Image: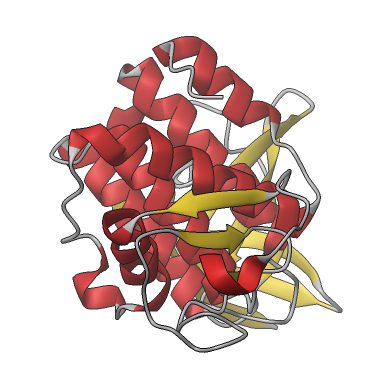
């Protein structure tokens, strides 16, 4: 049975001399693995759509959850990212994190939309890399149901204070009066500006998400907070993130 899906290739893996396996995040089937026969041949009609960061309409044969590529029509490719190692390394981090949280047969179109928009702005080169990283990390957590409780202090519901404590592990806010003598190891102190940025990323609608402008004085701190939040929530560290840091030389730990 032939099935048509829109999806983004997040990873390609060579099999033998001519074939590949493609890990594709799709709009209606979640994360799937597709066998792409003969796509490494020079005359293959599917060669261009069998590369990482190609967004396309895929026609696949589906036999009990095993997918084989029949044909595909590209919608948008992000191949230009491979010519910029810094941006390409960040794109691979986005892909690895997305693959870790995505599941088969459970589509999440907002996650697909998030990574497509993130790749778009990476390619456009009109957003700071650390800003895109921060937006992606925190919003990915929000879209998979791990959105932090940012409405106000979880004890007294105070909306803001000169300093708010963000419990990264519990995903909660405390004001200074309510936090008390707690373990500060997984807590970040937020001033009004940082709290505004974090609330905007986690809670605003997707259409406005990438309009966020962050002062350069706050970029590294914001990026460090969203990174720690993702890693604590997932209990996972990604090697592609280490490579991104090595390439661009950022050190904000």
Q: Residue at position x 68%, y 72% from top?
A: 61
Residue at the farthest right position:
64
Say whether residue 189 is left or right of residue 85: right
Residue 43 found in image quarter? top left
The correct choice, above or below, for 54 with respect to 138 in the image is above
| Residue 85, horizontal then vertical, whole percent | 39, 17
Q: Residue at position x 58%, y 65% from top?
A: 141
| Residue 120, horizontal then vertical, whole percent | 26, 50
Closer-to-camera residue (179/6): 179
- Quadrant in the picture for the C terminus: top right
Residue 69 found in image quarter? bottom right
- Quadrant in the picture for the N terminus: bottom right
Q: Residue at position x 81%, y 50% from top?
A: 235
Q: How is the image coloured?
A: secondary structure
Residue 48 seen: no
| Residue 49, horizontal then vertical, whole percent | 44, 47
Closer-to-camera residue (173/67): 173
Closer-to-camera residue (190/199): 190
Residue 235 seen: yes
Q: Residue at position x 65%, y 58% from top?
A: 168
Q: How many marks?
A: 0
Residue 205 found in image quarter? bottom left
Closer-to-camera residue (36/123): 123
The correct choice, above or below, for 224 with respect to 246 in the image is below
| Residue 207, horizontal then vertical, whole percent | 22, 76
């Amino acid at each position: 049975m032939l099935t048509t899906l829109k999806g983004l290739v997040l990873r390609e893996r060579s099999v033998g001399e001519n074939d590949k396996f493609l890990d594709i995040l799709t709009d209606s089937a979640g994360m799937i693995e597709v066998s792409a026969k003969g796509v490494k041949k020079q005359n293959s009609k599917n060669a261009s759509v069998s590369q990482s960061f190609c967004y396309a309409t895929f026609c696949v044969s589906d036999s009990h959850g095993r997918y084989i590529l029949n044909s595909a029509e590209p919608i948008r490719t992000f191949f230009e990212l491979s010519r910029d190692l810094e941006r390409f390394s960040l794109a691979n981090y986005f892909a690895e994190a997305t693959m870790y949280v995505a599941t088969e047969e459970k589509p999440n179109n907002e996650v697909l939309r998030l990574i497509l928009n993130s790749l778009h702005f990476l390619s456009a080169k009109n957003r700071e890399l650390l800003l895109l990283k921060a937006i992606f990390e925190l919003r990915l957590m929000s879209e998979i149901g791990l959105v932090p409780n940012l409405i106000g202090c979880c004890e007294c519901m105070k909306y803001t204070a000169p300093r708010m404590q963000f419990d990264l592990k519990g995903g909660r806010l405390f004001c200074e009066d309510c936090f008390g003598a707690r373990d500060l190891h997984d807590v970040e102190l937020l001033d009004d500006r940082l709290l505004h940025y974090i609330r905007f990323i986690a809670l605003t609608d997707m259409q406005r998400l990438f309009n966020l402008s962050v002062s350069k004085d706050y970029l590294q701190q914001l990026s460090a907070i969203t990174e720690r939040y993702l890693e604590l929530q997932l209990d996972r560290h990604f090697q592609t993130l280490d490579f991104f840091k090595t390439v661009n030389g950022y050190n904000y730990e």
